[in-house]
Image (cartoon, rainbow, N blue to C red):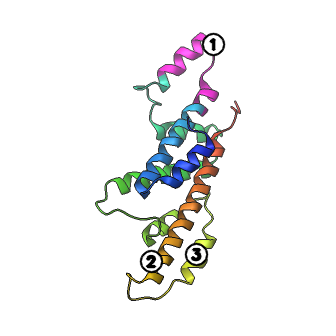
Amino acid sequence: MISKDNFIRQLSEVASLRGFLALSVNQFSQNIELLINRVFRKKDFVVESVVNSLFEHQGPLAELSVRLKVLVSLGVISTEVFEDINFLIELKDQLSNEVEEFSFSDSYIIDEIKKLHHIDLNIVLDILKKEPKLDNKDSLQYQMFQTRLEKIVRSSLILAISAIRDQLDIESPL
């Protein structure tokens, strides 16, 4: 598994939003697997054989979305973490099916990520209020604004994803 610092570095280096979301969902999947292991995988042979059959590749609890439901229903993770991870999975899947490549600063993406519980978009919203009203999207001023907005949205998403990842890095409460 990727260390937190390396994960944040990798997120900041990913060029596309699709790649960013794919890396995030992959990391969540790995963290959820580790959390499942801490919660359910016990050394008792009987428990281990039953639990392994449920969580293995063909088992009924093998899918990430099902594992999330199990963890939230047992109170291991919060509803907010559950909703945010599901939202990011759905957004990743939706963008994977799109022909158009979206950037972090697209208004559609900003509107969508407002749904996340773990994100603070106050800086982004303040900047959007000051958006230059330019007809020429090729102007240097407009491009500088978009680049700044892109970096701030990316940073906000990295902080949110990092906070969610931290919520998955807990000891078993059971």
Point out residue 40 in the picture as x, y percentages from the top left corner. Answer: 60, 25
As drawn, which residue projects farthest toward the top?
Answer: 45
* Picture disc at residue 121: none
Quadrant of the snapshot with the N terminus: top right
Q: Nearer the viewer, mark 3 or mark 1?
A: 3
Residue at x 50%, y 78% (from the top left corner): 145
Q: How many marks?
A: 3
Left or right of 15 in this view: 47: right
Q: Secondary structure at mark 1?
A: loop
Distance between the alpha carbons at the discs numbered 3 and 1? 53 Å
Span highlighted in magenta in the image = 35-53
Where 81 sits versus 147, above or below? above
Q: Which mark is residue 44?
A: 1
Dominant SS type (magenta): helix
Tell me the residue at 39%/25% (across/down).
58
Q: Which mark is residue 125?
A: 3
Q: Amino acid at mark 3?
A: Leu
Q: CA distance from mark 3 to mark 2?
A: 18 Å
- Would residue 114 be seen by someone viewing this image from the given angle? no
The amino acid marked with disc number 1 is Asp
Quadrant holding the C terminus: top right
- Please tell me whether mark 2 or mark 1 is closer to you in this view: 2
Residue 12 placement (x, y as % from top left): 53, 55
